[in-house]
Image (cartoon, rainbow, N blue to C red):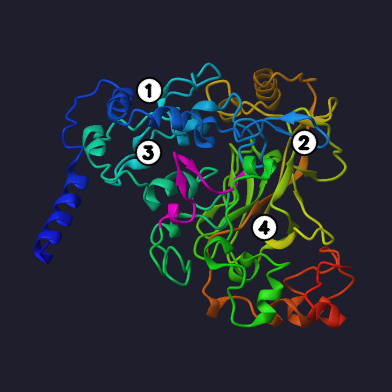
Amino acid sequence: MKTWTVLFLLLALQNVSAQEHDFIEGPFDSPQEITETCLGCHEDAGEAVLATRHWTWLGPEFETDDRGVIHLGKQNFINNFCIGVTSNWPRCTSCHISYGWKDDTFDHEDPANIDCLVCHDQTGTYRKTPTGAGMPAEDVDLVTVAQSVGNGSPSRRNCGVCHFDGGGGSGVKHGDLDDSMFEPSAELDVHMGGMDFTCIECHTVDDHQIAGAGHSSMAEDANHIYCADCHGEEAHEREILNTHAASVACESCHIPEFAREEPTKTWWDWSKAGETRDNIEEAFDRELYSKKKGEFRWEKNVVPTYKWTSGKAKYYLPGDNIDPSAPVQLNTIVGTISDPESKIAPFKVMRGKQPYDTENKYMIIPHLFGKDGYWSTFDWDSASRIGMEAAGLDYSGSYAFVETEMSWPIHHMVASSDDALTCTSCHGKRGEQRLDWKALGYSRDPITRGTRFEQGLVNEE
């Protein structure tokens, strides 16, 4: 076949891919009608999506060593940002891949409720109403968006509109994901900026199941992806670096700091909410106080907290008893210095204060959103009663605030080899500012321990 013929066919196929949805004309009385149109051709996609964590906000049931069978995910675990989804659905589910999840009667078995557009829009104009239970904004041209989906692969923007702004704004939750990652420089992220990666180049997709361990996957110890999946186990020319890789996660050296262009929230004190303050201080152009939400702390260029991890974590579950005399660990990273499967990895540790039931000794999931929610009434007792009833837990009528901590893994904002940490970043006097060797289980900096370190046996104490 002649070269020009091949080129003509390739261009024609490319054009078909770009124009293959022009037959969608509308108008549509509801966004669900668009989904039904999508499923008319993509018959198997609906059932596939219904089986995903993105849809259920739950991982599969799994057996634990000490708690029997549990079912965990964003739908039912507690964090120290906006605390919990239960009774706050219309606000929280504005970032869900559905239409209309406004209460606990939402039908998770109906594929017509799937929002295909939020993951496949290629116009960059699709938006959901922030308090609309996942419904699209009224000014969105649904027909134009539906026609734009092209080859169907989610772009970085498709993923980022939810994941970069988790917790109510850019960089609030994750620290290594914020709006600077839509168009990052190579210095900010060597993959997305230097090589123009989309999210799904690493978070690969199989029948709508997306690889990558979020919190529900960490609880189950499943769905992990690793740098070595692409780079191999011996990615360095220097053997000492490959030796380190047996005990140190790639991210520990290649993500020296996170929140490098935009700040991330590191402290949230709900106990201060409800006050009327005349002068609101700011840091990094972010407010440090909100009457609805309390006091905040923001940080930039944050040095991670390093912990041993096997890839697994244990989570506080609603109704678990707490000890209010110490910070409540909303999750605990599983890993030890003596576990050969564990590696030292970077985390953002989020801290704050949030309500708990002083008699039942467990965390409260308050009702925040809506006309009877705390953001309208500023009444913690009422918000606690409504929220705990929705969660199916008793509320004693007595509440106070307890400090909490939650660890979020750091995987993005990957530096090039030229900007990665060096030996003295972690070892020697300078290294003491980055790594707490005693907290990691060592008696001192392991480089002083001679041959055991040189042989790569840094997991032994």
Element type at marker 3? Answer: helix
Element type at marker 2? Answer: loop
Q: Which of marks 4 and 1 is in front?
A: 1
Residue farthest toward the front in the current orientation of the protein: 1
Neighbours of disc 1 within 10 Å: few (<14), some (14-19), many (20+): many
Q: Residue at horizontal 62%, vertical 35%?
A: 73
Q: Mark 1 points at which residue?
A: 112
Element type at marker 4? Answer: strand
Residue 191's x, y, as percent? 45, 65
Neighbours of disc 3 within 10 Å: few (<14), some (14-19), many (20+): many
Q: Mark 4 points at which residue?
A: 347
Q: Which of marks 4 and 2 is in front?
A: 2
Amino acid at dot 4 = Phe
Q: Which of marks 1 and 2 is in front?
A: 2
Q: Which of marks 3 and 1 is nearer the N terminus?
A: 1
Q: Residue at horizontal 52%, vertical 45%?
A: 166
Q: Quadrant of the N terminus?
A: bottom left
Amino acid at dot 2 = Thr
Task: Report if the CB atoms under discs 3 and 4 are less than 8 Å apart.
Answer: no
Q: How far apart are marks 4 and 2 (CA)?
A: 24 Å
Q: Name the residue under label 2.
A: 64
Q: Distance between the residues labelled 1 and 2?
A: 35 Å
Q: Residue at horizontal 48%, vertical 24%?
A: 101
Residue 197's x, y, as percent? 41, 61
**Residue 388 in the image: above or below residue 427:** above
Q: How far apart are marks 4 and 1 (CA)?
A: 38 Å
Q: Nearer the viewer, mark 3 or mark 1?
A: 1
